[in-house]
Amino acid sequence: MTGEWQATSRTMIEPGRDRRVERWTLNFGPQHPATHTTLQLVLELDGERVVACTPHIGYLHSGFEKLGEHHTYDQYVTVTDRMNYVSPMANNIAWHHACEKLFGIEITPRCKAIRTIILELARIQDHLLCLGAMGLDVGAMTVFLYEFKPREWIYDLFEEICGARFTTSYTRVGGLMHDMPDAWPDHVKSFCRRTPEAIDDMEVLLTRNRIFIERTKGIGVVGHDDAIDWGLTGPMARASGVKRDLRKDEPFLCYEHNWDGAGSSPPQFKVPIATGGDVYSRYLVRVEEMRQSLSIVEQLIDNIPAGSVNVEPEGKRTLSSKSEVYFSIEGLIHHFEKIMTNRGFTPPMGEAYGAIESPNGELGFFLVSDGGNAPYRVRCRPPSFMNYQCYPQLIVGHQISDVPPILGSINIIAAELDR
Amino acid sequence: MSEPPADIATEKVVAGHPAVRALVESFDQQFDFAPGLLKAGENQVCVRVPPDRLLEVMTFLRHDARCRFEQLSDLAGVDYLQFPGATDRFAVVYGLVSLTHNHRLWVKCFVNDPDPKVPSVVAVWKGADWPEREVYDLFGIVFEGHPDLRRILTWEGFGAHPLRKDYPLRGLGERESYPVIGRDHA
Amino acid sequence: MELTGPTGAPGHTGQPAYALTRLDKLLAWARRNSLWPLPYATACCGIELMATAASRFDIARFGAEAMRFTPRQCDLLVVAGRVTIKMMPVLQRIYTQMTEPKWVISMGACCSSGGEFDTYAVVQGIDQFMPVDVYVPGCPPCPETLLEGFMTIQRIINEGRARPSHQRGRGLRIRVEPRSPSQSSATEGGQEG
């Protein structure tokens, strides 16, 4: 199965080079610290310069999409946790956003507010790890250890709200697993007070650091038109000047006008756009996105509407709350009908696509339903997969020591890439 | 393919989406619409295109001023083998995004066994490269004109196309047949 | 290496000699307090492994913060995350390249048993194809659980002394019994049977 790997990509020959060049092939990965888990690069090198690059992926291909055909809509959320595993909540929200589009369910304002706050916390979580890993790849190990501190605070928040620090599976069709605890908003506010300083600590180490700038400026440049053509989304595209953010362009959750039915406007925030298209621009875009996310959380955390967090279960679409299941016969019957495979509600037949702006880009799920309990086809549109395609074009011509920073700046999560 | 819900008429679909209007006006072909479940005009409109006209239609959708679908957001395969009421087996689904006009369009191209072949759209969008390889890997649909069509997620020599409906979830023994090493293996 | 008495006769009294026992204990102490893990992180468990190495849970307390990625320098292979059959040859090669003595932690449900992914591509337990010393349950295991796994490896090293992997055999033969409220607060985990 390992076989003899050959660099099968197009080799670039520089015009005007007339001496015979001795090229050699280097295998980079799939077990390598800089390859962020299971990526393999077969590099053809001319000394230290990369002349050709062939990425090999699929080392973590676990059949997620095939699993989707065997799990119900509420069971599959556990699988989505394991896709982009540095921000699992974002995947949960994306999955149920697509499911609710398929069923035509409009979730309650309270649910929208909590989901938006959680999405932004997941965004902060993802960017922290990405930047920490980027720092680690260029040798700045302190940043990596520093950024785990606010990540642990976010893990604490998630553990409080849903019981699991990491693989959360918090959303359900039509709502959430259960409502947030009463003390949670205070803890989120305390988090918002402490985190800007933590981000400042990180910035102090990297943003104006001469070595970091030398290693990341002008490296791995993607042009504006190329970024669109390659299908790049998220910070990767925005760092090349592409003005696209699904929170503004195709609003969902609290980003829509009148999201609570009472005329509320969406939270005020800016979308950072850079024009350099290089690794440093992506770093700057991510840092600024973290600060904007904190601002969104602060705006929403005091204004979470009261009310139910789940859509009413008479339509038998959401699970009843546990107190109803244990203390009323209707709740118990609804619960059974929802979870048993030969009963339960019948989703409509047809197809739908729902996408959110996840920390990595446009994360969408394309669902085909044949009316049964489980989807007929689940397709995840993974931002990492689309973003990674352009990598050979980015690395050719650079030094071998530029391979880790560029790879880190794309923020490839192998589980999302391979599914 | 399932029947579209009766209340979504084709005229409404055409009227609500400028790109679809442009398509219908510029091509003499009768296009089928599979609007999905949502109201027409909500970015879920789907056009069915036959494989022989796919490249033409895609190029038009990319470059025409009313369409301007600069980005291919997604390229997926679907196997309709066990879908009630399906007439064709495989569909390749293209999700197109226009950044200029901020609208989306879905295009479906149906092919059948044996020998499912679809023209590759790599010439239109560079970002179709790996998704097409993935659809080839998982479904066995061949993309004509693709520069480097080989397996991407499974390994060369895997032999099967796992996302087809007649391939079992747990596989056919590929995950079990592998040499074992012991503690004294050096 | 089977330690014998000073006369050289194997198992003269059935017990290793005093001086060599002390050396043995010293070696075991040195090894267990300076484990160098090879973080073979494939998926989500890798993030919890990183969290264990970070400051809150701090694997440096156990002397194990030197995470080297080359098998030649490591003695503990921490397989964190699901292993697909495409990745298996790589994992086996890394294992064979590691020098003795070496231990393997299978971290998480996915590499211990396939976990949630009972699909065509995921190996249903890496112990089908390679030896494993400690299984750490969880999806992903909390850092505290992983540290418990580390501590179990340290106990294995204590028991097994300086023997290489193939002489060590498997496991600690730990038998875990449920604790009744009347028992005094014993150590966590189990009793050695």
Image (spheres, coloured by chain):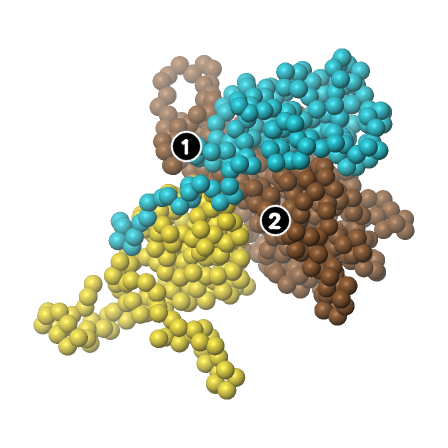
Same chain for the residues under marks 1 and 2 in the image: no
x then y, percent, for residue A416:
57, 42
Q: Nearer the viewer, residue A387 or B107?
A: B107
Q: Horizontal placement of A312 versus A151: left or right?
A: right
Q: Nearest the camera: A317 or B158?
A: A317
Q: What residue type is disc 1 on? A: Gly
Chain coloured brown: which letter?
Answer: A
Numbered tag placed on residue B157 in the rendering: 1
* Chain for disc number 1: B
Residue A211 x/y as whole percent: 53, 42
* Horizontal side of residue A178 vs A44, given as left or right: right
In the rendered image, residue A150, in percent from the top left (x then y), is placed at 62, 57
Rendered cyan, the chain in question is B
On residue A71, which mark appears? 2
**Numbered badge on residue C9:** none
User: In the figure, residue B88 lies in which quadrant?
Assistant: top right
Q: Residue at x 83, y 60 (%)?
A: A307
Label 2 packing within 10 angstroms: few (<14), some (14-19), many (20+): some
Quadrant where the C terminus of chain A sits is: top right
Report, in whole angstroms, how far the alpha carbon at label 1 lies from the one at label 2: 29 Å
**Farthest residue in the top direction?**
B28
Residue type at mark 2 is His
Q: Colour of chain C?
A: yellow
